[in-house]
Image (tube, rainbow, N blue to C red):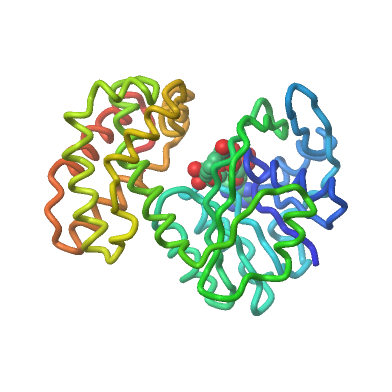
Amino acid sequence: MTWHVLGGGSLGALWAARLGRAGLPVQLILRNPQRLAAYRAAGGLTLVEQDAAQTHPVPGQLATDSQPIERLLLACKAYDALAAISSIETRLRPGAQVLLLQNGLGSQEQVATRVPQARCIALSSTEGAFRQDDFRIVFAGQGQNWLGDAQAPPEWLKELALAGIPYQWTGQMPTRLWRKFALNCAINPLTVLHDCRNGALLEHLDEIQPLCAELVELLNHAGQADAAVALYEQVIQVLQATAANLSSMQQDVRAGRRTEIDYLLGYASTCAARLQVPAPRLQQLHLRLLEHLRARGLPCA
Ligand code: NAP
């Protein structure tokens, strides 16, 4: 069975290259004919690991290709997920399996609603990769891929092991997604507003503590009490353990790229309003971040 990977960016390329070099059939779906032509001219995906670069000639195609899709890794940003799944939805076989690796919350639901014929499996990755150039990806950080749904683990997990892709199947994926969402809401926007690395936020615990208290309330009202346990303590641990890192949102802002704000603070604000949970600090943080992005000419969604 072929792995279709939609998106030749950081994580899409990391997955496609590893699956391809393990001899598994992979097709990379590119955005448009220009991107497909550029990809073919590049000769494949180049993966840089510990300073060694290797090119993997994974075949590329467009969303309009006619090949049916039975297994898809949706490897775009959260704000592109709905348009991306819509572009291939008629190719999905009934019962097709779709892995969603988008950060934040909201896009998973948008995609699952759009393709009810598919089994959508959420995935949360702590692996790190970035684009050095088009179709040239640096594998920057080892990590884990958590994935799962309420059904039995699928047969193809052993293909991940074959490809050297670390994974952990879990029936508690919503808890993981909500926990990561809460950590990202507490950390990422403040790193942007203070223009700092993660560790420097340890000097702003007076802002972080009440924010975490609001997030805990929100998670509890959303039926995600397990994801709320000792949130503030874990935020501090993350800030200490990743002190030298730039958060993903901070990297996006510094590079002048669109952020995934709608799937973090946007989702938090909407959720708080829907559940009628007071969240003045989250809302104020959202407004401050929107203002910050606007002032730099960056998209506010
Ligand atoms: P990325 O480097 O920006 O790659 C996204 C790719 O999706 C781009 O190559 C883009 O194409 C492609 N794309 C978007 N819409 C498309 C469409 N309709 N058809 C075909 N291709 C399409 O993003 P990323 O860093 O891999 O992140 C993906 C998700 O993983 C995000 O939610 C991110 O937060 C999460 N994540 C990333 C990392 C990491 O280390 N990178 C770690 C954990 C989680 P173009 O190249 O043509 O723009």
In the depicted structure, whether residue 116 falls above or below residue 16: below
In which quadrant of the rendered image does the N terminus lie?
bottom right
Where is residue 120 drawn, in percent x and y? 55, 68
Ligand 1 quadrant assignment: top right
Residue nearer the viewer, 142 or 117: 142
Q: Position of residue 245 (x, y in %)?
A: 46, 25
User: In the image, residue 271 lies at what x, y percent?
Assistant: 25, 58
Which quadrant is home to the C terminus? top left
Q: What's the residue at 40%, 59% (across, down)? A: 175
- The quarter of the picture where residue 282 lies is top left
The residue under the point 22% across, 56% down is 218
Q: Which residue is pictured at 58% across the width and 72% down the height? A: 119
Q: Is residue 151 above or below residue 34?
A: below
* 3 horizontally vs 294: left or right: right
Total marks placed: 0
Question: On the rendered structure, is 141 left or right of 165?
Answer: left
- Give me the residue at 78% from left, 33% from top: 46
Is 134 displayed left or right of 219 in the figure? right
Residue 65 position (above or below residue 47): below
Residue 39 in picture, x, y percent from top left: 77, 39
